[in-house]
Image: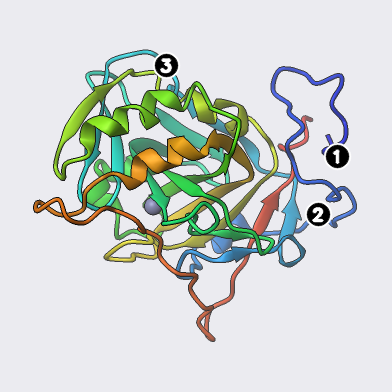
Amino acid sequence: MTGSSVVSGLSKNECYCAPPDYSHDEDAHIMVEEWRLQSVQSPIELKHEESNAYDHFEPLEFHGHWDNEGTATFTNNGYTATLRFADREMPVLFGGPLHEDKYVFEQLHFHWSEDDHSGCEHIFEGKAFSMEAHAVHYNQKYGTFGEAVSKHDGLAVVAFFLTATDDFENECFNKLSEAVKNIVKIDSTTSVRADCLTWIKEEAQCKGYYTYQGSLTTEPYNESVTWILYPTPIHISRQQVDNFREMKSTPCEQHNIVNNVRPLQAAHPDKKLDLIYARSHKKSE
Ligand SMILES: [Zn+2]
């Protein structure tokens, strides 16, 4: 696949959501081990012209993220809504820029703001979206999220943009956007269906994603994150975003979580952003 205009003849694992016009980029020659040692503060603006296209990663693989197994809970911690799984083997992420390591699913949470035009943390080509979802994983070799969080290769976060539109309700996303109504109170938790992540499935099978070495966007801001960002937004309705804005941030219930977005971080003069556009999988031999 080389552009977004081709919609026919797709095989099972291909899609046509990659941004257009990338087919003439030179393929970068990077040393993945060295690339993984550098990092900057997140979030950043993603500019395609400042990225290096790279064709030699192994396929990025999601295992178990949308299986209907075990249990899932959605919690209001006063800052965001967080999804966790239990009573099952945790989903695992590997391949792509993750080198030889496997990353275990820890939680998925959301960022949003008071309006539908500024609720994402990363900015793509000058454009902001209504929400950003972060699927947080830790490197299995460190055993727990707590051990991994301070290591340079400790975490992998997959980010998806969500954009609100007037007339499109995303049925798959309803499993979470309706459940949010049960966690309006701070520190409240509700059960959700274990297969509540199907709304990311299609996007996660796209080959065109951006990746860089960055940081957590919440305290303690460790520079331990391999970011994997899919540029094409997932469509949801305005009402689905609004449901999240009803969540309370304080026990007194006078304040809603209306903005949980960290501002863009300016590049530190001593650090270089090395943004990679993973254009396609490794060529088969
Ligand atoms: Zn986040």
- Where residue 229 sits: x, y (%)? 57, 48
| Residue for badge 3 | 67
Asked which colour scheme the image uses, the reply is rainbow
State which quadrant residue 46 falls in.
Answer: bottom right
- Where residue 1 sits: x, y (%)? 83, 34
- Where residue 160 sits: x, y (%)? 53, 43
Which quarter of the rendering shows the C terminus? Answer: top right
| Residue 27's disc number | 2
Q: Does dot 2 land on a helix, a strand or a loop?
A: loop
Q: Are marks 2 and 3 in contact (CB under 8 Å)?
A: no
Residue 263 appears in the figure: yes
Identified at 46% across, 65% down, the residue is 42
Q: Are marks 3 and 1 in contact (CB under 8 Å)?
A: no
Q: CA distance from mark 2 to mark 1?
A: 13 Å
* Label 1, residues with CA under 10 Å away: few <14, some 14-19, many ≥20: some
State which quadrant residue 6 falls in.
Answer: top right
| Closer to us: 269 or 95 | 269
Foreground tag (2 vs 3): 3
**In the image: residue 50, left or right of residue 45:** right
* Label 3, residues with CA under 10 Å away: few <14, some 14-19, many ≥20: few
Q: Please report whichever mark, 2 or 1, sits nearer to the chain's N-terminal start.
A: 1
Q: Residue furthest left?
A: 252
Number of labelled discs?
Answer: 3
| Residue for badge 1 | 2
Q: Does dot 1 land on a helix, a strand or a loop?
A: loop
Q: Is residue 176 above or below residue 111?
A: above
Residue 139 appears in the figure: no
Question: Disc 1 marks which amino acid?
Answer: Thr
Identified at 36% across, 35% down, the residue is 105
Identified at 39% across, 23% down, the residue is 175
Q: CA distance from mark 3 to mark 1?
A: 30 Å
